[in-house]
């Protein structure tokens, strides 16, 4: 199955999460969790580059894209519970879980709270914490804390452009801006506030893990990668030289190859 298909799952309580799927429905399951104000479309460049032997499922998380927009529930624990509910709806006992940026927080929380459901982690542009992060504090103080509807498209474009270090296809950037403009100002605030809360040291996670980090990332630092490696004894780091915060946009083929090799390695060891 080479095409990307889309569907929608309804979770207990009525929350609906759209998702995209690619690959053999009987293949090795891989969940892909997007970043702040993105949607499943964040992974559109790399999904077709994954082998058909992987069943890749990329949801839009609550408040994002065309998902339901409840008034609350934007902490990592809430989003991780949603993903566990999606896995139940899709009949997935466990999966490899990839998270980008905010999605990396959700993936780590899922692995910490429900370790039996996570076969392995792939963390892209991940951070140990955003509490005290100067770039994120500037984003909050300078724009998000006072954001009102309708959200200014020029602000959204500047925000999305700031996440890449190299040029990406204009259509990709246009899509990212359009998806971010679907997010109401209240969710821009709630989701970023949740990520900025004081946090303990990263929870110890025993699952195998792969960290993909661009060395030009303006948000997630090398110190973040080192802190995560210290908390995950079965993790390794792959540095994408010259890439920014979204290497799956800048180098989708290389990231897809990294992920495919990681998933294949887990299957071989199993």
Image (cartoon, helix red, strand yellow):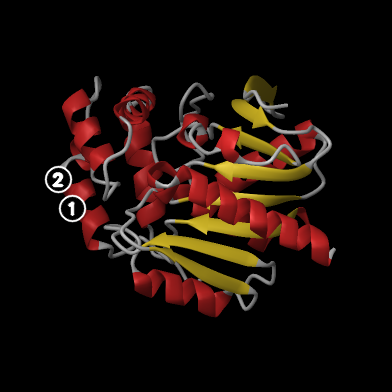
Where disc 1 sits, the SS reads: helix
Which residue: 31% across, 25% down? Answer: 174
Quarter of the rendering containing residue 19:
top right
* Quarter of the figure with the N terminus: top right
What percent of the width, then of the height, locates residue 149? 25, 22
Q: CA separation, marks 2 and 1?
A: 6 Å
| Relative depth, front residue between 194 and 45 | 45
Q: Residue under label 2, please give it.
A: 142
* Quarter of the figure with the C terminus: bottom right
What percent of the width, then of the height, locates residue 150? 24, 19
User: Where 134 falls versus 191 (above or below)?
Assistant: below
User: Where 182 falls versus 103 (above or below)?
Assistant: above
| Circle 2 crowding by C-alpha within 10 Å: few under 14, some 14–19, many from 20 | few
Q: Is residue 201 visible?
A: no
| Circle 1 crowding by C-alpha within 10 Å: few under 14, some 14–19, many from 20 | few
Q: Are marks 2 and 1 in contact (CB under 8 Å)?
A: yes
Which residue: 35% across, 46% down? Answer: 192
Q: Is residue 53 visible?
A: yes
**Residue 196 as seen in the image, left or right of residue 88:** left
What percent of the width, then of the height, locates residue 126? 44, 59
Q: Which mark is residue 122?
A: none
What percent of the width, then of the height, locates residue 236? 56, 72
Which residue: 33% across, 67% down? Answer: 221
Q: Which mark is residue 138?
A: 1
| Relative depth, front residue between 82 and 43 | 43
| Relative depth, front residue between 217 and 196 | 217
**Residue 33 as seen in the image, left or right of residue 165:** right
Where disc 2 sits, the SS reads: helix
Pick out the residue farthest to the left: 142
Q: How many marks?
A: 2
């Amino acid at each position: 199955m080479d095409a990307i298909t889309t569907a929608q799952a309804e979770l207990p309580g009525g929350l609906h999460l759209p998702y995209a799927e690619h690959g053999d429905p009987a293949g090795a399951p891989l969940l892909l969790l997007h970043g702040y104000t993105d949607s499943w479309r964040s992974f559109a460049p790399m999904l077709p580059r994954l082998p058909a032997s992987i069943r890749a499922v990329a949801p839009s998380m609550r408040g994002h894209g065309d998902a339901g927009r409840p008034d609350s529930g934007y902490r990592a624990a809430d989003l991780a519970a949603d993903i566990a509910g999606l896995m139940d709806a899709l009949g997935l006992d466990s999966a490899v879980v990839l998270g980008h940026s905010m999605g990396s927080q959700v993936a780590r929380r899922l692995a910490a709270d429900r370790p039996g459901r996570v076969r392995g982690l792939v963390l892209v542009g991940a951070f140990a914490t955003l509490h005290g992060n100067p770039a994120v504090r500037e984003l909050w103080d300078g724009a998000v804390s006072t954001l009102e509807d309708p959200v200014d498209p020029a602000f959204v474009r500047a925000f999305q452009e700031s996440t890449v270090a190299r040029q990406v296809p204009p259509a990709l950037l246009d899509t990212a801006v359009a998806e971010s403009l679907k997010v109401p100002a209240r969710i821009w605030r709630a989701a970023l506030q949740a990520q900025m809360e004081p946090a303990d040291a990263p929870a110890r996670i025993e699952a195998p893990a792969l960290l993909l980090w661009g060395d030009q990332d303006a948000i997630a630092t090398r110190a973040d990668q080192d802190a995560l490696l210290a908390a995950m004894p079965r993790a390794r780091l792959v540095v994408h030289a010259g890439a920014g915060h979204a290497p799956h946009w800048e180098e989708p083929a290389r990231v897809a190859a990294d992920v495919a090799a990681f998933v294949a390695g887990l299957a071989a060891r199993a």
